[in-house]
Image: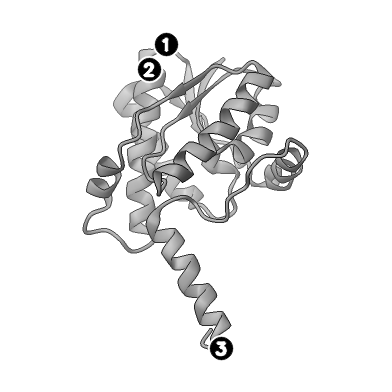
Amino acid sequence: MRILTHVCCGPCFTAVHENLAKEHEVAAFYDNSNIHPGLEWRRRLLYLRRFCDQQHVRLSVAPYDPQAYFSAVNGYEEQPVRCHRCYQLRLASTARAAAAAKHEAFTTTLLISPWQDHEALLDIGRVMEKRFDIEFLYRDLRPLFERGRELSRAAGMYRQRYCGCLYSEAERFRAKLAKESGQA
C-alpha cells in the first residue's frame, strides 16, 4: 500500500518509517505550521531531510504558514482543544495531499508519541478519511517510542523537548520555572 505519512519531526519518523516500510511504500509529508519559531521549523526539517535522503524516502514539504495555525487555534488556546484543532489542520492537509497524489492511505508520526491524544487522532483521522475519500491508517505506535529515540540518537538527530507550538513551549517553561521556584 502507498502511504503518505504526516511527519512532525525526524526522530518520530525513524521508527515509524522502519515499522511501516516493512509492509508499505512510505512517503513523508512535512506540514507543521504550528512549529514556532521559524528557525525551529527549519531545524526539524533539516534533520528530517537528511534521514529521508539516507533512506530514499520521498519527502514533500508544505509551505510554512504560522498564520494558518494561529487562525485555527485562535480562541482555543487551552489544552486539549488547541491540540485537537492542530491535529485537524495537519491531518486535513495530509489527507488532501495523499488523495491528490493517489496514495492509498495516510497516517501520522504523532501516533508514536505517548503525549498525544490517540482517541482524538483516531477520530479526526476518520473524519478526514471520509472527507477526502482516503484510508486513515491508525496504528498505536507508542511501543516504538523508545526505538525511535535509539534510532535518532544513533543518527545524531536534533531531538526537541516540546511539540513545537508556542503554547507548548510556554507551558514547558512555566512548569520548569514553577519547579525551580518550589511552586510545583
Label 1 Cα neighbours within 10 Å, binned few <14 / some 14-19 / many ≥20: few
User: Is mark 3 in CB contact (under 8 Å) with mark 1?
Assistant: no
Which of the labelled discs sits on residue 102, or is there none? 1
Quarter where residue 38 is shown: top left
User: Is mark 2 in CB contact (under 8 Å) with mark 3?
Assistant: no
- Identify which residue, 15 or 61, lies in the foreground: 61
Identify the residue at horizontal 70%, vertical 41% (top origin). 148
Q: Nearer the viewer, mark 3 or mark 1?
A: 3
Instruction: Return the residue at label 2.
Output: 99
Q: CA distance from mark 2 to mark 3?
A: 51 Å
SS for dot 3: loop
Instruction: Return the residue at label 3.
Output: 182
| Quarter containing the N terminus | top right
Q: Amino acid at mark 3?
A: Gly
Question: Considering only vertical position in the picture, is 20 above or below 56?
Answer: below
Q: Looking at this rendering, what residue extends furthest in the front direction?
A: 39
User: Is mark 2 in CB contact (under 8 Å) with mark 1?
Assistant: yes
Question: Considering only vertical position in the picture, is 63 above or below 83?
Answer: above
Q: Position of residue 135 (x, y in %)?
A: 44, 24
SS for dot 2: helix
Q: Position of residue 184 (x, y in %)?
A: 53, 84
- Identify which residue, 138 or 50, lies in the foreground: 50
Q: Amino acid at mark 2?
A: Ala
Mark 3 or mark 1, earlier in chain: 1
103 lies left or right of 84: right
